[in-house]
Amino acid sequence: MVNTYFFRIHLSYDQCQYLYTGSTSHAVVTAESGQRIRIPASNLRPFIGQYGIRGRFRLITNQNNKILSFEPVS
């Protein structure tokens, strides 16, 4: 069984520093369905730009909650 989650992230560049410094190993987001999801910081790092992270994302996991896909969507 595959699970798909959609959520928005709006973090400033300063807030993203925690993801790079190792101060935190994950972020907790709330999906549009209301579910809370823990995402490893390593999955978020590629999406940090000069203004931080902004946008809507799709996360696909398998039945064991292993991430199969994590990508920005419009």
Image (spheres, rainbow, N blue to C red):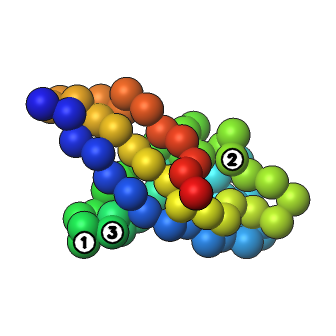
Write the residue at 68% across / 61% down.
53
Residue annotated with mark 2: 47
User: Please, what secondary structure does the residue beneath circle 2 have?
Assistant: helix
- Check contact, mark 1 vs mark 3: CB within 8 A: yes
User: Please, what secondary structure does the residue beneath circle 1 have?
Assistant: loop
Q: Residue furthest right?
A: 50
Q: From the top left corner, tell me how far across and down residue 12 is, in percent.
A: 73, 72
Write the residue at 80% across / 54% down.
49
Write the residue at 29% across / 45% down.
4
Quick one: label 2 or label 3, which is nearer the N terminus? Answer: 3
Residue 54 lies left or right of residue 5; in this view the side is right
Residue 32 — which label?
Answer: 3
Q: From the top left corner, tell me how far across and down residue 43 is, in percent.
A: 54, 39
Which quarter of the figure is the C terminus placed in? bottom right
**Which residue is nearer to you in this view: 55 or 13?**
55
Residue 33 lies left or right of residue 47; in this view the side is left
Does the rendering let one see residue 68?
yes
Rendered view: 19 above or below 13: above
